[in-house]
Amino acid sequence: MTLPTARLARALAAPAPGWSTRVDAVVVGSGIAGLTAALELRTRVPRVLLVTKGELSSGSTVWAQGGIAAALDPQDTPEAHLQDTLAAGGGLSAHDAVKVLVTEGPERVRELVARGAVFDAGPGGDIALTREGGHRADRIAHAGGDATGAEISRALVAQIEAVRHDPGIEVVEHALVLDILTSAPAGGGVRRVAGVTLHVRGEGSRDGVGAVLAPVVILATGGIGQVFRSSTNPAGATGDGIAAALRAGAVVGDLEFVQFHPTVLWLGSGAKGQLPLISEAVRGEGAMLLDVDGHRFMPGVHEMAELAPRDVVAHAIVRQMAATSADNVLLDVRHLGRAFLSRRFPTITRRLAELGIDWSEEPVPVAPAQHYHSGGVVTDLAGSSSVPGLYAVGEVACTGVHGANRLASNSLLEGLVFAHRAAHDVAERFAAGNLSTAPEPAERPGGSALVAAVARSRVQKAMSDGSGVIRTAASLARTDERLAAVRSDAHVAAEVVAQPQAAEWETTNVHQVSRALTRAAWLRTESRGGHFRADHPRPDPDWERRVLVYLDDDGVLRVR
């Protein structure tokens, strides 16, 4: 069985830029990775532009509950952290990338504290450390109990605000980056980064579509949650960075490895959009998973029971739901007591109370939902992609750290560590004179696309039905067929009501990422980490390799 040839456009259909400016580097995104990259670059290159879709404080980092992992305890070691990360990665983590993460991580966390982040402290005043699934040591630093991301975001945003009027940095909020500009092919047919086009929504004098010319673009655009019907990701997680990188000719990888968080609040079969997450840290503190008959099932599945890696727990929940003909399982924390829950998890306690749930008195209904994407733009250890001048950091990147499955609380650390490395690599190249000016942008072959915003629910349903937690060759082929039927040609779909605007551009990104992810998942005929094939339920040693995806000059989606 083969899939028909798939073509994706090499640009979004959009008006010609009405304004332009030149900078030395563009950073796209305002989570931990984007803010760190911008702060590190600010004093190292003359002019940095930081672009974010919403306000500065609206990055995905703010939603991170559990914490940030690092070997900060004298009894812990980077080597132990490395081994836990490799174990969770299912044999596909890049050893060198993981080593960078765990060895540089503690120092980066200390720098975060120096930038004003306040973590919860233990009795002796040191950072309090807890444990989450897959970790064999207490190495999770947290803030506000379960508001770690919000505290990190607050501290970094404050640092940006303090220098916002510095002539060396400009912040553009409420701006959607449309496409990465590239040069004409040089030697070997290589195109270099030449900047970005973006649409600024009603903010400042640079309104509408404009062009920012720059020799460096650092993507820190977060995840792909809105590709699926239900997710813990915010509404802005529409895969913009991966889609833009694909259109620019970058290689992306590990797209099939989607982490479905095991314990997301079950709000009924009609729930969609961003769903409340019940943090991994809750199980770290002793929460138990029960099926709807009250049977605790995880001890019979894995030696670490509820603290097993997330893919193990998610798949076990799906199987238990099927065995009991139920739509959910139950997370039981009643034995922890109201006082402890309110102190340790104040945000979750308040959110549940708003929904009429007192988790100190009743088990919480939960089910898996899309949470994190291990794949992304393939980079080296400095965050550099296959397109010269294009970097990717944080969830949008594929550094090789996560492999087939992310270890809990490694995501914030990855964004922090690799944003620092990317910024310093750019600074070194700038100092060496290798990034003095942006090349002139040139039009790429392959046409433009626009998918009507109303088609998004159709795309999400297709992905959730066939490319979700459990996949088969047949389900993936059906998904691919349904996605191919979505009208995306900006020039011939005259009968489709679609205008070049944010909702359509985001939906086009969702559609393109969905097609690439489904093709990668169809090719990988095994189960590993965040990729589960019911028709190939076990890992295959022959598949201890990465699936790479890219667009050729004709826009043909190549998967190898």
Image: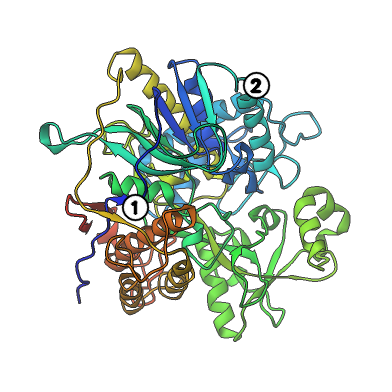
Q: Is residue 468 visible?
A: no
Which mark identifies residue 13? 1
Question: What residue do we see at 40% from left, 55% from top?
Answer: 509
Which amino acid is tagged 2? Ala
Which amino acid is tagged 1? Ala
Q: How many marks?
A: 2
Q: CA distance from mark 1 to mark 2?
A: 37 Å
Question: Looking at the picture, how far across and down is residue 161, in whole percent?
Answer: 64, 26
Q: Is residue 279 left or right of residue 475?
A: right
Query: Is disc 2 placed on a helix, strand or loop?
Result: helix
Q: Residues within 10 Å of mark 2 (few under 14, many from 20)?
A: few
Q: Which tag, 1 or 2, sits closer to the chain's start?
A: 1
Q: Is residue 11 visible?
A: yes
Q: Quadrant of the N terminus?
A: bottom left
The correct choice, above or below, for 163 with respect to 440 in the image is above
Query: Is disc 1 placed on a helix, strand or loop?
Result: loop
Q: Is residue 194 left or right of residue 555?
A: right
The foreground one among 186 and 86 is 186
Q: Residue furthest bottom?
A: 325
The foreground one among 398 and 20 is 20
The foreground one among 286 and 205 is 205
Q: Residues within 10 Å of mark 1 (few under 14, many from 20)?
A: many
Q: Quadrant of the C terminus?
A: bottom left
- Snapshot quadrant of residue 476: bottom left
Question: Looking at the picture, how far across and down is residue 79, in whole percent?
Answer: 48, 36
- Snapshot quadrant of residue 267: bottom right
Question: What residue do we see at 42% from left, 67% from top?
Answer: 497
Which mark identifies residue 162? 2
